[in-house]
Amino acid sequence: MPLRTEPNEPDTRPPVASRHGKRLAWALGSSAVALAVVAGFCVHDALAAPGPGGTQTKLARWGRCHGLGPVVNLVDNRHQRATTTAACGATAVVAHRTPARPRPRPTPTLPPIPLHAPVRPLVSPAQQGEGVFTALVREKGRPVIQSAILRPDPYDTEFPVGVVWMKQHALRFQMHPGVSEPGGTWTIPATITPAERTGLVAAYNGGFKVSNGDSHGGFYLNGQTIGELRTGAASEVFHRDGSLTVGVWNEDVRMAPNVVGVRQCLVPLVRNGQVTGDAYNGGVDTWGLTDGGNAAVARSGVGVDRNGDIVYVGGRMLTVQSLATLLQRAGAVTGMMLDINLSWPSFISYDATKNPHDPAPHNLVNFVRDATRYYDYSSRDFVAVYARP
């Protein structure tokens, strides 16, 4: 059956959009009033609730709890960003920007120790590697003791000479008396006892006899003197802080409260960075008797360079002049002779790799005495060298 149609009549109702707009406006208005009433009570409760912050903070907290976070963020975006970690009705926690963590302080690094400049050899032309320093002892990764090997002359190549450079500030030097030289009774033993071997890195021989006057000087240790400390004598001077220097007594060096040891021996070989005239002109009275009366014998010497670092030279076929020359070429500004003749010179390094409390000894070159020499009681004085902690 066909639908019934009415004649076309004008529609007097307002347009749909207009009707919907009025309804929406009425609904929004009613909701706003209701929301305002409810919000008023809620805001009142929020402001009255205990918790941190003032009115602004509590209003922001309440708004975020009731879905107004975007509005609050728009207002407060440049000052803080917040989030709630508690349910609505509980005190919320406002998270501020985390302050930047302070940067950790860098671990102090020890200054590097470069290898010493090569020593110009006594023999020309030089062989490959001759006079070039390499690390003999490393401490904390740094070459605190370095050595170079050279020929003493063109012929005695089976008796190499060792030149040693020791970094002063990284090391501590301890003088030991010998049982018979200088003799006497001391608080420091004539050996490196097992209790004193931790940190030990080197040891080397002392000088001429003091007891019979051969050294032309004295021996002083911890307030006790054997012989006489002589003005003008070449002297090793040991200080309370473990440092060592070499000088001329009562000129470069003298007695002071911080001096704990003095070892004198003859006159200087090197003075003001130059080989002395005595090194060329002195005879037996100046430089002592040698094995068989030979000029080239086992000799040793020690010096200090312009930076305060210590230089040692030792070998089995050295003359007074070649010993002095090598001390000077190694940088000594003051240098002196130590013991001579086959039985006495020694420079020993100690390797703590396997046992830091009982390091293994090694001779620098082919000295006659065994490398364990100072682990036994020594008849003559010597110097023990330790790494500083």
Image (cartoon, rainbow, N blue to C red):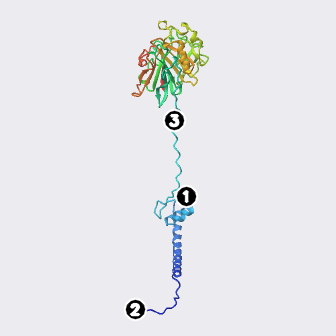
Q: Nearer the viewer, mark 3 or mark 2?
A: 2
Q: Which residue is mark 1?
A: 80
What is the residue that sits farthest to the front in this orientation?
Answer: 125
Q: Which residue is mark 2?
A: 2
Label 1 to label 2: alpha-carbon separation: 70 Å
From what the image shows, is residue 368 above or below residue 72? above
Q: Which residue is mark 3?
A: 109
Amino acid at dot 2: Pro
Look at the numbered disc 2 and give the secondary structure of its residue.
Answer: loop
Q: 277 or 86, which is in the foreground? A: 277
> The residue under label 3 is which amino acid type?
Thr
Residue 62 seen in this snapshot = no
Q: CA distance from mark 3 to mark 2?
A: 104 Å
- N-terminal of the pair, mark 3 or mark 2, is 2
Q: Position of residue 251 (x, y in %)?
A: 61, 17
Please, what is the three-letter code of the amino acid marked with disc 1?
Gln
